[in-house]
Image: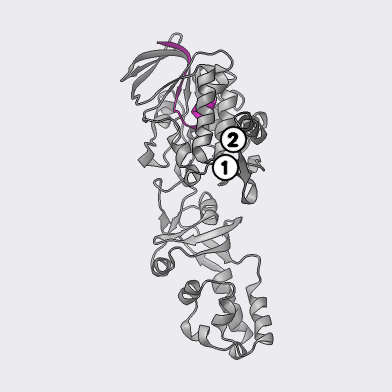
Amino acid sequence: MNYDAIIIGAGAAGLMTAISAAQRGRRVLVLDHANKAGKKILISGGGRCNFTNMYVEPANYLSANPHFCKSALNRYTQWDFIELLSKHDVPWHEKTLGQLFSDNGSKAILQVLLDECSSAGVQIQLDCQINRIEKITDGFALQTNQGNMQCLSLVVATGSLSFPTMGASDFGHRIAKQFGHSVTQLQPGLVPFTLDKPWIEKCIALAGVAIDARATVDGQSFKEALLFTHKGVSGPVILQISSYWKPGKQVEICMLPDVNLFSLLKDAQAEFPKRQLGTVLSQHIAQRLLEQFVPEADLKEVMQHFKHSRLQEIADIFQNWQFIPSGTEGYKKAEVTLGGVNTDEVSSKTLESKIQPGLYFVGEVLDVTGHLGGFNFQWAWASGHCCGQFI
């Protein structure tokens, strides 16, 4: 079984690579160990699929080489993918911060990719276990549970370590290392934080409570919703900042970042001196949150009895909350993996290895990680499309 290209991984990047290459007349085979193509696409965004973002910039990506992503993102933009959806009459809508979602859920996005593969003549083989890969004179030879195969170009689109329950593994990184590549340090990204006592006890009592917040680590900040969980804190703002956090680092949280809580309390004290503090705060902060963060005696005290210094302390409880996470919930809850195949060893134009001709890397297996909000899908579309133009 001889092919122009074999792509390992039937996810977003792999399918996009296959479409791009097959439309140029290449004979393309996609292999995947799973029993269904695009499993991670199907579960993305809770099945709603945040497929890209209106405002894609290189600054939305983390990499040891921040310039690497620029070439592919410039050559296949969010507008190109939107045009593809329009071709298939797939409706979509914009949510907050430029996030674009399919009206018909993630199944519609996957079906577009599968239809494009079908019309271009891409072959997809599922339940395929690859036992051995070796370089031969004219390309690569693969030994699998479905027979032996050969190809001129081999594309690694295996994803990375996040969602091990979906079959995620380090297989792509092992292939890279086999052919002389290095892999940068890996860690879970876009992942909830876990906390230790005494905060964990408060978080258990607050599980399910959400509030707008700004999270900051080492000068990097994001502003979105924070969600308390039984293990610590999550929500979009925590997932975003987790990609910048290192163990032992302090996280700073400002709840209600668009409000100056101290000024609000001072104004309420002047206007409603006989109201209880708890009554004033409950107009802005959930009762359960107040009960866990502010002493009960303070909540029941009337506003006129507080010194300004104490009002400032109470405001700081919410707007200058500082903690050091005990860790994260790990790869099983991480949406992405930070780190990957060293991009200094890969061409940013073709996605081809600089070490082993004919070997290519696309998507999450590379050391390119996007922010939350559709940016990782856009990297999959862009890197896959651009790679497919050269294999």
> How far separated are the C-alphas under marks 2 and 1?
8 Å
Dot 1 crowding, Cα within 10 Å, few <14, some 14–19, many 20+:
some
Q: Would you identify the image quadrant in which residue 56 lies?
A: top right
For the point 39% across and 62% down, the residue is 230
**Which residue in the rendered view is the most extreme toward the top?**
137
Whether residue 63 can be seen here: no
Question: In the depicted view, which residue is nearer to us: 283 or 178?
Answer: 283
Where is residue 370, by image quadrant?
top right
Q: Which residue is mark 2?
A: 90
Residue type marked 1 = Asp
The residue closer to the viewer here, 272 or 71, is 272
**Which percent across, then down, holds residue 290?**
50, 75
Q: Which residues are magenta?
A: 1-16
Quadrant where the C terminus sits is top right
> On the rendered structure, is 98 left or right of 132?
right
Q: Position of residue 384 (x, y in %)?
A: 55, 27
37 magenta-colored? no
| Residue neighbourhood size for the residue with mark 2, other residues' Cα within 10 Å, grouped as few (<14), some (14–19), many (≥20) | some
- Residue of label 1: 103
Give the structural element (helix, strand or loop) at label 1: loop
Residue at 48% in and 42% down:
44
Tell me the quarter of the picture where residue 262 sits: bottom right
Kind of residue indicated by mark 2:
Val
Residue 335 appears left or right of 79:
left
Instruction: Indicate the position of residue 159 as horizontal and vertical percent values.
Output: 45, 34
